[in-house]
Amino acid sequence: MTQNIKLDDSKDARKYQRERTQKVKDLNKSFDELDTKAPAFIKDRASKKLYKYLAEQLNNSGYINNTDQSILVTLVINIQALESAYESLNNVGATYTTDNGMIKKNPAVDVITNTTTKILSASTALGFSPASRASLINLAQVDSEDSAQKLMEMFADE
């Protein structure tokens, strides 16, 4: 199991931590920043505000770039779905009784379970936990060739 190395460019950090953190930031400079305006299909006002706030924070970190937008969108959409499901759970309860007298599980329970998993996954990918922030240092473990250019060449139409 590989050891997670802390990303830290503060003056109190160790020299090797600052150097590796700078390598991650330098790699990301070859990409555009995340757009801070939420995609048009995100209609909910609170979700738009959340998207903007998180995009700004991620851009400030220097570790994330525009190629990570789909992960951020996934995170925001699932947070909104979690909030809606939780509201249903509070209003209806974990179970409800049908007109026939059958007791059924509120589908919001499954939505909460599924969205929680997706939120944790997207949060980890974006570095919203100490361990995942530390693992981003692996991005700095690339060779000195222009990695962004390599990626663009791989996806270019020929």
Image (cartoon, rainbow, N blue to C red):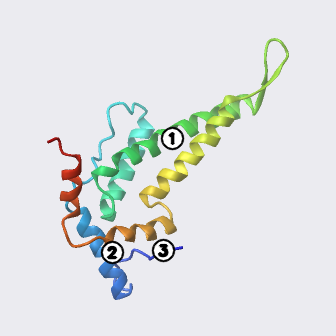
Q: Nearer the viewer, mark 1 or mark 3?
A: 3
| Dot placed on the residue nearer the N-terminal end, 2 or 3 | 3
Above or below, comparing residue 107 to residue 151 in the picture: above
Which image quadrant for residue 144?
bottom left
| Dot placed on the residue nearer the N-terminal end, 1 or 3 | 3
> CB of mark 1 within 8 Å of CB of mark 3?
no
| Residue plotted at (60% across, 41% down) | 114
Above or below, comparing residue 46 to residue 28 in the picture: above
| Residue plotted at (38% across, 87% down) | 14
| Residue plotted at (35% across, 58% down) | 58
> Residue 137: horizontal and vertical position, in percent?
38, 71
Instruction: Determine the CA span between mark 2 and mark 3.
Output: 13 Å
Q: Residue furthest right?
A: 101
Left or right, 91 with reference to 104: left
Instruction: Determine the CA span between mark 1 and mark 3.
Output: 27 Å
Q: Which residue is mark 1?
A: 78
Tag shown at residue 21 = 2
The amino acid type, in three-letter code, at marker 1 is Asn
